[in-house]
Amino acid sequence: MLKNILKNGIIGGCIVSALLIAISFYMKANPEKEVNMMIGFAGMLIAFLFVAVGIKKQRELNNGYLSFGKAFLTGFLITLIISTIYVLVWLVILYNYFPNFAEHYTNMAIEKASPEEVAKVTEEMNSFKEMYKNPILVILITYIEILPLGIVYTLISALIIKKKNVTT
């Protein structure tokens, strides 16, 4: 079980991290251009395919049967590995290659705001910049970007792939 979870978690983590690296360096090289958030979500969904692969493999390893609880646990642990790799890669990027990310992101959000929203967006973005000065909050914010989507994907995958042992 552990080998299956680690393998699928690491593969999924590498996929989502490769996209994160590409987007981050693109943003840094092209500060005037905004990256579509759907690209990031698509990368996360591709990475989370390995949650379903891992749950299915776990069912095969369990002679074709897998309870919902065991399926969800397997998927959740894979999701946690994918998410943790994503967070760790972001921390490396942020602190080593893109230390002005909060400023960059704030400026983009304010420029994009309509004239009547500028004051509100500026206040929100200043709050964001303050939060981003705390490494613990950076970690939590980054987990919030990916983990909820992974949990939903895990729940759906576990419901679809589970197969109870029917005794006659």
Image (cartoon, rainbow, N blue to C red):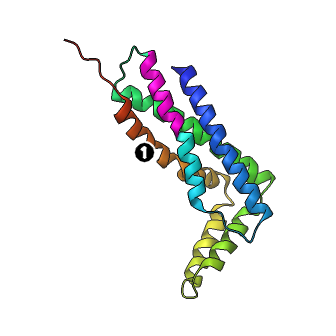
Is 154 situated left or right of 141 in this image? left
Magenta segment boundaries in residue numbering: 49-61
Q: Residue at x 56, y 43 (%)?
A: 46
Q: Is the residue 70 above or below the residue 38 in the image?
A: above
Q: Quick check: 7 above or below 130?
A: above
In terms of image quadrants, where is residue 106? bottom right
**Which residue does the image show at 58% across and 38% down from the upper left?**
82
Q: Residue at x 72, y 51 (%)?
A: 22
In the image, 29 versus 147, the foreground residue is 29
* Secondary structure mostly taken by the magenta-highlighted segment of the chain: helix
Name the residue carrying label 1.
152
What is the crowding at mark 1: few (fewer than 14 residues within 10 Å), some, or many (at least 20)?
few
Residue 143 appears anywhere in the view: no
Q: Position of residue 10 (x, y in %)?
A: 63, 32
Query: Residue 155, can we see it?
Result: yes
Q: Is residue 74 magenta?
A: no
